[in-house]
Amino acid sequence: MSGHSKWHSIKHKKGAADAKRGKLFAVLIRQIEVAARSGGGDTDSNATLRTMVQKARDNSVPVDTIQRAIKRGTGEEAGVVYEQVSYEGYASGGVAVIVQALTDNRNRTSAEIKNIFSRNGGSFAEPGAVSWQFERKGIVVVDRSVDEDELTLAAADAGADDVQDLGESWQVTTPPTDLHAVRTEIEGAGITVKSSDLTMIPTTTVALDAEAAAKSVLRLMDALEDHDDVEAVYANFDIPDSVLEAVSA
């Protein structure tokens, strides 16, 4: 498991996700609006919208809130127009970082994200500078209590790439276009899915063995994720368990 995944697992256990629930709802609603605007409001024909709606349901967003977001996206209801933008940069130690945001003011968001990088020991980069170090993938998360062989068989039948142990859960990695099919196959086998989403997985990683370096990188990650416009942050750092536990204590 990558250091970034381990870091998020620890944050979830410490309850950090609950503290940001309000922001999470806002991001999920914006993702639905953007997906509906770009591909239409039909989840059967709009795979991105289907994924975003499922993600919102996994996080207990009310159905009527989801439907209103779709209508705003398709123009049936008035609302602020958001666009998806991506930024690339580096954290300390040459760690590659991709930031995805949803904004109604591209210039404002760009300036603020650039400022976060510079204030936290990072640097902004040109588009394409680091994205080549990542692959777009789908992930399905299942409770760790599920039998590994049973899960692996169901996932493989649907074309999944891999099943990883995240400690308290299993993570199934899939080609991005197969995310819905893999989730459907897993649920069809009687296995309850905790969540599913599209993500960026690094093809190479940067080892951070020193506590000071790890703290610097994670400080930047937290600052970026705290920004209201940011929907996701991906990085290619790998931190040993001992250092990660010490940093997060």
Image (cartoon, helix red, strand yellow):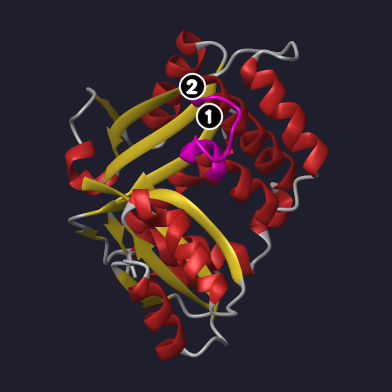
Bin the neighbour count of mark 2 within 10 Å (Cα to Cα): few under 14, some 14-19, many 20 and up.
some
* Residue found 19% across the figure and 45% down from its top: 133
Tell me the SS state at disc 1: helix
| Picture layout, residue 30 above or below residue 96 | above
Which residue type carries mark 1? Answer: Ala
Give the magenta-colored segment's residue range. Answer: 39-50
Taking the image as shown, residue 25 lies to the left or right of residue 37, namely right
* Residue type, label 2: Ser
Which picture quadrant has residue 120? top left
Residue 105 lies, with reference to residue 212, above or below; the image says above
Distance between the alpha carbons at the discs numbered 2 and 1 = 5 Å
Which mark, by number, is residue 35? 1
Does the residue at mark 2 contact the one at mark 1 (Cβ under 8 Å)? Answer: yes
Which quadrant would residue 125 be assigned to in this image?
Answer: top left
Q: Nearer the viewer, residue 74 or 30?
A: 74
Residue 79 picture location, percent across and down: 71, 13
Q: Is residue 30 visible?
A: yes
* Residue 130 in the image: above or below residue 213: above
**Which mark, by number, is residue 38?**
2
For residue 178, side relative to residue 112 (left or right):
left
Q: Choose top left, top right, bottom left or bottom right for residue 88.
A: top left
